[in-house]
Image (spheres, rainbow, N blue to C red):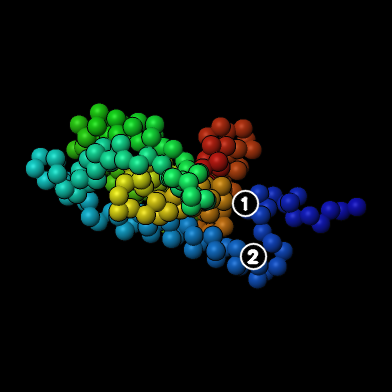
Amino acid sequence: MTSKNPAGNRGSADGIYPSSRLERGLLVAAIAVASIGLGYLFFTQLWWKLPPDFSCRDDFTRGGLCYFLQHSVDEADASNKLLKAEIFGSNPGPELSVPIGWATQLNAAFIENVVQPNIRWFGYVIWGTEAWIFLSMCLGFFSRLGALAAIGMSMQLMIGLAHTPNEWEWSYILMVLLSVAMFGIAPGRYFGLDRLLRPRFRALSERGSRVGRLLLLFT
């Protein structure tokens, strides 16, 4: 008996699609909106820290990107807890929370000892990574690799800033969760350039190419 399960088709490897054309269209549209939206979030942050000085002043010690890096270091000893849940109002402090003190300390040490002394070139790494995320998520180009970069950047922002005063922790946490979702979904398989690239990478993979398998993984 012939199976009618579309999972047996090679094309189904590029995404799990509902059978209905309407549902399929809604799925692709939702993924595209989420992916492009994530990319646009990073796009909006490119312009206040443009190279070559990243809006830093006084020999890369104040202002612009340098300010936020130093802010993460200065606030490393702040609350250091996220997602506080005060379930019983009679108890002092939240009953549930996620401690991140160890992560904020590691983040501060990395910034202070690696990023800040090398900000003249490390700034390009930060700016370039955010630009890559924007292009990857909006064009569906190596979208899983772009989502992986988004996870890294979002995690760093969450660890460095979410617990500090006058910041809304949900915004950073939601960025991490959206990035993780995009990594799992690989949005370029539903729209964008990855749909054109994957058949070529699959052909390489089927010929035993390790590079082809790696390229398939990141698209």
Is label 1 in a helix, a strand or a loop?
helix
Asked whether disc 1 touches disc 2, contact meaning CB atoms under 8 Å apart, the reply is: no
Tag 2 secondary structure: helix
Circle on res. 59? none
Work out whether 199 lies above or below 35.
above
Disc 1 crowd, CA 10 A, few/some/many (<14, 14-19, 20+): some
Which residue sits at x=60%, y=38%? 205
Residue found farthest to the bottom: 22
Name the amino acid, label 1.
Answer: Asp
Q: Which mark is residue 24?
A: 2
Name the side, left or right, on which 175 lies relative to 128: right
- Which of pointers 1 and 2 indicates the residue nearer the eye? 2
> Residue 212 appears at what percent x and percent y?
55, 38
Could you say which disc has been placed on residue 14 in the image?
A: 1
**Residue at x-position 30% and y-position 53%:** 166
Q: Amino acid at mark 2?
A: Arg
Q: Would you say residue 169 is visible in this rendering?
A: yes
Measured as percent of width and height from the top left, residue 15 is found at 63, 53
Q: Is residue 97 left or right of residue 116?
A: right
Provide residue 188's location: percent of width, then percent of height: 52, 54
| x 30%, y 36%: residue | 77
